[in-house]
């Protein structure tokens, strides 16, 4: 059985189990976090979330807002999409089988659903290598392990190709998989990269608006027109599409902040948003 070992433990998050649990706990209680420890008592049906993927010291508090909101749900399968920062492997790749290992333990890949999503949309290739180096999916998994005590599987999908048509088809394929399992969809993306803080806030505010309206066409228009440097735009779009097909009426912004808001260095920042679809 293939095991996807941690690529960024000790860099993006602590590599020792207890330290990692403490770091996640601190993110939930951070001023930019929800200020509470999961699970939530709110039983609102949330179909999917957008969560950032930087180091926990930068984006962890913002990310925990999304994770807190879904912490009372019990999905059998979490489908995570994110950008392939290294451009290695396939244009779109899902892991076919095996385990995804973190300092908090192992999570199994849902082989049946991996084979099925490949059948639904052939461009989602079955490939392990594409997943070996990147952090965009990896940093989401310890958060999921921490909020869910029940057993769940994952379907990790990593994207080099993030164009409109591809994202739309991935989203539709994810919605079809929802007929096979009780799922949660996680779109992994940061927003504006390495701009001055006020400019980042303006850019990201413009891009978040069509996300909340579930308007894919407008999302890609703003992305291109304003040249917003959101790295996982295809992951955002596929999550929007999947949730829309599953009956979501709107997105809701739970928290937005930049690395500059968190650290105080506002000269060159990265934007982070926590969004839920219901």
Image: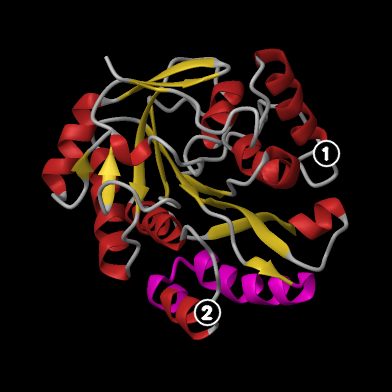
Residue lying farthest right? 264
Assess whether residue 211 is covered by the magenta stretch: yes
The mark tally for this picture is 2
Residue 39 occupies which quadrant of the picture?
Answer: top right
Query: Where's residue 263, x and y in %?
Result: 84, 52
Near-viewer residue (257 or 268):
268
Q: Is residue 239 above or below residue 115?
A: below
Residue 261 occupies which quadrant of the picture?
Answer: bottom right
Q: Is residue 192 above or below residue 27?
A: below
Which residue sits at x=18%, y=52%?
123
Query: Is 141 left, or right, of 201 in this rendering?
Result: left
- The N terminus - image quarter: top left
Q: Which residue is mark 1?
A: 30
Residue lying farthest bottom? 225
Q: Which residue is mark 2?
A: 227
For the record, the magenta segment spans 196-219
Which residue sits at x=44%, y=81%?
221
Applied colour scheme: secondary structure
Query: Where's residue 163, x and y in %?
Result: 32, 67
Assess whether residue 166 is covered by the magenta stretch: no
């Amino acid at each position: 059985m293939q095991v996807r070992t941690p690529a960024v433990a000790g860099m993006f998050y602590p590599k020792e189990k207890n330290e990692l649990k403490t770091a996640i706990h601190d993110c939930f209680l951070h001023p930019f976090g929800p200020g509470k420890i999961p699970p939530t008592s709110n039983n609102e049906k949330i179909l999917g979330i957008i969560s950032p993927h930087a180091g926990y010291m930068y984006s962890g508090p913002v990310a925990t807002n999304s994770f807190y909101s879904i912490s009372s749900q019990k999905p059998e399968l979490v489908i995570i999409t994110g950008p392939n920062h290294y451009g290695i492997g396939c244009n779109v790749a899902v892991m076919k089988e095996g385990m995804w290992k973190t300092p908090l333990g192992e999570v199994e890949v849902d082989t049946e659903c991996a084979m099925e999503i490949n059948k639904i949309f052939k461009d989602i290739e079955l490939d392990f290598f594409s997943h070996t180096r990147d952090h965009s999916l990896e940093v989401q998994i310890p958060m999921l392990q921490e909020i869910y005590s029940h057993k769940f599987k994952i379907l990790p999908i990593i994207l080099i190709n993030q164009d409109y048509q591809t994202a739309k088809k991935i989203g539709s394929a994810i919605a079809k998989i929802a007929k096979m399992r009780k799922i949660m969809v996680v779109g992994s993306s940061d927003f504006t990269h390495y701009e001055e803080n006020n400019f980042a806030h303006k850019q990201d505010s413009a891009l978040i608006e069509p996300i909340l309206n579930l308007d894919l066409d407008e999302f890609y228009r703003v992305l291109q027109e304003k040249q917003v440097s959101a790295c996982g735009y295809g992951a955002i779009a596929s999550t929007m599409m999947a949730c829309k097909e599953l009956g979501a009426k709107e997105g809701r912004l739970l928290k937005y902040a930049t690395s500059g808001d968190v650290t105080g260095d506002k000269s060159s920042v990265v934007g982070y948003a926590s969004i839920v679809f219901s």
